[in-house]
Amino acid sequence: MKTCCVCGLRKTAAAFHVNKAADDGLLASCKVCHTAYMASRRAADPVAFLLVGCKARAKKEGIPFDITSTDLPRPKFCPVLGIRLNYNGTGRGYGAQDDAASIDRVRNELGYVRGNVNVVSWRANRAKAFLTPEELQRMAQFYARYL
């Protein structure tokens, strides 16, 4: 049993997320309180929330990162696909939603730096993920013949 530092309730270990850095191996707040806290952070500034993951990826990949939340626009629609962006959805992992806002590096090798990032939909970001600009252009030219 462990007491949540937020709600003060005693709960079983299963009610807490794992935190390897903690002495007991568990997060100090329970899953319910932690989820509410994360939702409030996302609501306060959804782009800043997205940047947390970008900064971690930049560190892991050894690429530059020098942007802040104020450096990025907050479009209502994806500038690539025109779909309404959802700033509350997830744009990560297997549960990713196509309309989730996502931070895209125009040229991946330059990193997360001013002038090289856009806010687009997860669907647009995923579509370009493994293609070079030349491959994207060839793909667009190919399919344009069928329109």
Image: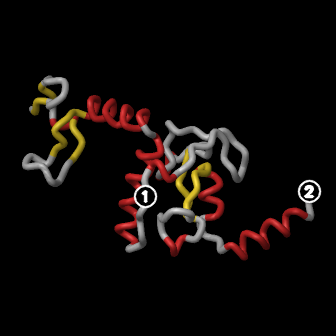
Q: Which of marks 1 and 2 is nearer the N terminus?
A: 1
Q: Is residue 73 above or below residue 43?
A: below
Q: Residue 118 carries which label?
A: none
Secondary structure under tag 1 reads helix
Location of mark 2 (residue): 147
Location of mark 1 (residue): 54
Give yes or no for contact between labels 1 and 2 (Cβ–Cβ under 8 Å): no
Tell me what residue is drawn at x 7 percent, y 49 percent.
23
Return the x and y of residue 112 as percentages of the image width and height: 47, 64
The one nearer the camera, 111 or 83, is 111
The one nearer the camera, 120 or 20, is 120
Return the x and y of residue 61 as percentages of the image width and height: 40, 72
Secondary structure under tag 2 reads loop
Amino acid on which the number 2 mark rests in the picture: Leu
Q: In this view, does 52 lie to the left or right of 103?
A: left
Quarter-of-image position of residue 142: bottom right
Return the x and y of residue 105 as percentages of the image width and height: 55, 64
Q: Quadrant of the N terminus?
A: top left
Amino acid on which the number 1 mark rests in the picture: Cys
The one nearer the camera, 65 or 88, is 65
Q: Quadrant of the C terminus?
A: bottom right
The alpha-carbon separation of the residues under discs 1 and 2 comes to 36 Å
Q: In this view, does 140 lie to the left or right of 111?
A: right
